[in-house]
């Protein structure tokens, strides 16, 4: 699944999700976030957080509709660790080493 965040007709962000069997789950399918991207010009304002959260909501909906039992996000590059921790915790994820996971 690929989702887009827009302002009017202009795309300012995107997110990707893959779904399938995964060795960490014996209870069902796990969705993996391939990335959540917001244009750099929009990252310093409130719109960035709202856009990222909106993208996450769309990814979660897609994972639920596909029958996934969890969503996983691997540690990302280029983002301050504190911001990353804060975002995933607000979305209900728990930290599992270098990864984040949320049971659905």
Image (cartoon, rainbow, N blue to C red):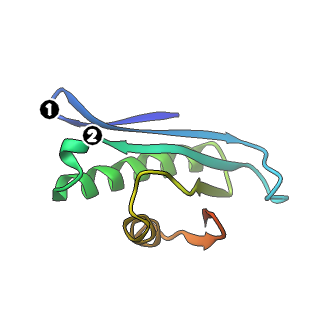
Q: Separation of disc 1 and disc 2 at Cα?
A: 15 Å
Q: Are marks 1 and 2 in contact (CB under 8 Å)?
A: no
Q: Nearer the viewer, residue 35 or 18?
A: 35
Q: Check the image and name the residue furthest to the top.
A: 9
Residue 83 placement: quadrant: bottom left
Question: Can residue 63 be seen in the rendering of this structure?
Answer: yes
Task: Please tell me whether residue 102 is drawn above or below residue 38 in the rendered image.
Answer: below
SS category of the residue bearing label 2: loop
Q: Which residue is mark 2?
A: 39
Q: Earlier in the sequence, mark 1 or mark 2?
A: 1
Crowding at mark 1 (Cα within 10 Å: few <14, some 14-19, many 20+): few
Q: Position of residue 50 (x, y in %)?
A: 25, 56
Q: How many marks?
A: 2
Q: Can you give x and y, in whole percent of width and height, for residue 61 in the image? A: 49, 48
Residue 87 percent coordinates (x, y): 40, 65
- Dot 1 lies on which element? loop
Is residue 78 shown left or right of residue 21?
A: left
Report crowding for label 2: few under 14, some 14 to 19, many 20 or more residues within 10 A (C-alpha): few
Position of residue 16 in the picture relative to residue 32 (left or right): left
Residue 75: numbered disc = none
Determine if residue 104 is in view. no
97 vs 16, left or right, is right
Q: Quadrant of the C terminus?
A: bottom right
Residue annotated with mark 1: 8
Residue drawn at (83%, 53%), measured in percent from left and top?
A: 23
Identity of the residue drawn at 78% across and 45% down? 21
For residue 96, side relative to residue 57 (left or right): right
Indicate which label's residue lies in the foreground, 1 or 2: 2
Q: Going 85% across and 58% down the picture, which residue do you hit?
A: 26
Q: Is residue 99 above or below residue 41?
A: below
């Amino acid at each position: 699944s690929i989702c887009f965040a827009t302002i009017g007709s202009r795309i300012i962000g995107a997110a990707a999700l893959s779904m399938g069997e995964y060795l960490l789950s014996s209870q069902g399918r796990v969705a993996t976030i391939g990335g959540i991207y917001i244009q750099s010009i929009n990252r310093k304002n409130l719109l960035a957080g709202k856009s990222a959260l909106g993208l996450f909501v769309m990814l979660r909906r897609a994972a639920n509709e596909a029958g996934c039992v969890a969503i996983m996000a691997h540690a990302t590059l280029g983002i301050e660790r504190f911001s990353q921790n804060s975002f995933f915790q607000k979305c209900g994820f728990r930290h599992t080493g270098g990864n984040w996971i949320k049971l659905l």
